[in-house]
Structure formats: C-alpha cells, structure tokens
C-alpha cells in the first residue's frame, strides 16, 4: 500500500531490517503514520524549527515530523540495527534528516541543531524521566529548546501536569510547572504500539517560560521539595524541621500552616517558602 512519503509501510520496514523489538531498549513502535503525523502536529509549526528526536527506532515519528514540514530533524538512536532503515528516510528528505547512532544520555546534539529547536520524542520508558529532568534543569534558563512534545507512560504524564491535592502531585509537577506550561495533549491505548506495552501512554507538551513562574533559588527549592515529598504523609513542620531551628515561623511567613502536608502546597507556596528560608 502506498504511503504519503512514498517509503514502505513501517511493518515492511521492520520486516526488511529484522527489527524485532528489544524490551531492554524500551522498543514499543508506533506503526500508524497518520498517528505519528498527528503527534508531530502537537508540537506546533515545525517549518522554521530544528527538531531533536530521541529514539526514532524504525522511523515512524521521524517520518511524521518530516511530512509535517520540520526544517531539520536530528534523530538520536542507540540501536545500530535501526540505522539502515533511518538512512532510507534521509535519502527521501535530502539535507533534512541527520541520524546519530548514539546513546541520548551520553551525547550533546547541540552542534547538529540550529535555533529555534523543539524536542519531539516517543521516549524509551527506561530513560524518559531522566532525559526530561535534564532538559528541565539546564545550567542556564532559558534552555536550548522552545518546547518538548514527549510520549510517556500515562502515569508519568500525569505526574508532570498534576495539581496540588491530587494523587500524582509531587516533585516532577513542581519542576515542570515552575518554568514551563505543561499539558497532556493526547492519550494512547497500549494497542497503538507494536508490541503493545502493559500500560497506557500519553503525550505531554511543555512550553518553556522566559523565566521561573515565581522567584526562588533552584537548589533550595529542590532541597525543600525533596524533603517535603520524601515524607509526604508527614506535616511540614516535621518533614522540614531540619531546615531551620524555627521552621514553624518560616512556614507561617510563607503563608503555609505548619500542620499542612506537602501535597497541599502549591508551587507558589513552595517558592514563597524557598524565599523565606533563603
Ligand atoms: N520513535 C519510535 C516510534 O515511535 O515508533 C520508537 C520509539 S521506542 C518507544 C524508543 C526508541 O528509543 C527505540 O528505538 C530504542 O532503541 C531507542 N532508545 C532506547 N534507549 C535509548 C537511548 N539511551 N538513546 C537513544 N535511543 C534510545
């Protein structure tokens, strides 16, 4: 059957290159090119952007990004078996796709990318959260990217967008929402992938803010939220007592009742506490 880009359907690509999915590489492939193009559209207008894609695999999302007009895609894939399949895409889009056979945790792709840059990826589950945290905590803000459009396990996606007093609210929500707008833009059932994972998935779109939503020292904010959510069932006057000899006064100064628990405190509240303890 003909595809929109004239390349073979993904099932055929997988067969030709013998890309039997490897669990240890988090390989759950998207084979529906309509779906991958839809995910690419969630990243916004790509025509004037370079896109960093981590884990292109057989290239479903890569092809979606190129069909949707990405100026240049830099795709970082750890599995050498996928490279020949990806090179076939490069041949159809001369000058618009750079494939790097590397571990995304050990490479800095900056030299291959030109601003403005968006990151779009169906992330391998085993490294997804680690990469997200790296992208959210660069040495200087704003970071090298404008937006992140990322597929995660549904539970991780919910942790990124969670609000106070909800089950998934915690450090990841605070980290993401401190300097980004974050929302879930798509839900996917296990059957959307080959092989089907055990869990549901969701795409999160994060847009960077020019600076933090509320002023706070990053290291102190991290320290406070780590302690507070490390013992999330405890009252803050107890979980944070090592931070200050009169922690109750500091909590009150920040507008927090000392008997409240971490999950009740908004991002604004944690930032106010960070300033009062600074
Ligand atoms: N983008 C493809 C798709 O949507 O069908 C594949 C997604 S699959 C969930 C994750 C991909 O990430 C796999 O191709 C896997 O080989 C690759 N991968 C796993 N760990 C990686 C790493 N550390 N660096 C780069 N790629 C990695």
Image: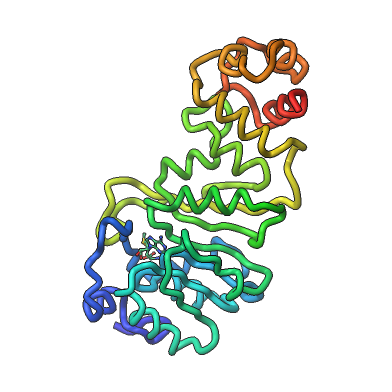
Is residue 34 visible in the rendered image? The answer is no
Is residue 209 visible in the rendered image? The answer is yes
Query: Which quarter of the figure has residue 260?
Result: top right
Q: What residue is at 61 percent from the left and 10 percent from the top?
A: 259
Q: What residue is at 71 percent from the left and 31 percent from the top?
A: 271
Q: What residue is at 55 percent from the left and 69 percent from the top?
A: 109
Question: In the displayed structure, would residue 218 be above or below residue 138?
Answer: above
Q: At which x and y percent is residue 20?
A: 22, 68
The image quadrant where one finds ligand 1 is: bottom left
Quadrant, the N terminus: bottom left
Quadrant, the C terminus: top right
Q: At which x and y percent is residue 7?
A: 36, 84
Q: What residue is at 30 percent from the left and 52 percent from the top?
A: 190
Question: In the displayed structure, would residue 191 be above or below residue 40?
Answer: above
Which residue is nearer to you in this view: 193 or 75? 75
Which residue is nearer to you in this view: 108 or 124? 108
Q: Is residue 33 left or right of residue 15?
A: right
Q: At which x and y percent is residue 100?
A: 45, 75
């Amino acid at each position: 059957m003909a595809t929109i880009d004239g390349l073979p359907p993904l099932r055929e690509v997988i067969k030709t290159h013998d890309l039997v999915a490897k669990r240890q590489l988090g390989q759950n492939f998207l084979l529906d090119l309509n779906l991958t193009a839809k995910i690419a559209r969630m990243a916004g207008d790509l025509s004037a952007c370079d896109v960093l894609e981590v884990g292109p695999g057989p290239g479903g999302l890569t092809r979606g990004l190129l069909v949707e007009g990405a100026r240049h895609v830099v795709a970082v894939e750890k599995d050498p078996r996928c490279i020949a399949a990806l090179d076939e895409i490069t041949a159809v889009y001369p000058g618009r796709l750079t494939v790097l056979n590397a571990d995304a945790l050990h490479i800095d792709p900056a030299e291959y990318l030109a601003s403005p840059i968006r990151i779009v990826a169906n992330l391998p589950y085993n490294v997804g959260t680690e990469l997200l945290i790296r992208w959210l905590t660069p040495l200087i803000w704003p970071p090298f990217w404008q937006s992140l459009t990322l597929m995660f396990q549904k539970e991780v996606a919910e942790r990124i967008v969670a609000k106070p007093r909800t089950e998934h609210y915690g450090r990841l929500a605070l980290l993401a929402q401190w300097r980004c707008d974050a929302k879930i833009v798509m839900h996917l059932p296990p059957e959307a992938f080959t092989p089907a994972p055990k869990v549901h998935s969701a795409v999160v779109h994060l847009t960077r803010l020019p600076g933090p939503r509320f002023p706070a020292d990053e290291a102190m904010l991290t320290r406070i939220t780590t302690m507070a959510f490390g013992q999330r069932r405890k009252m803050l006057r107890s979980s944070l007592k090592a931070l200050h000899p009169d922690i109750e006064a500091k909590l009150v100064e920040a507008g927090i009742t000392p008997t409240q628990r971490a999950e009740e405190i908004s991002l604004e509240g944690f930032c106010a506490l960070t300033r009062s303890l600074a």
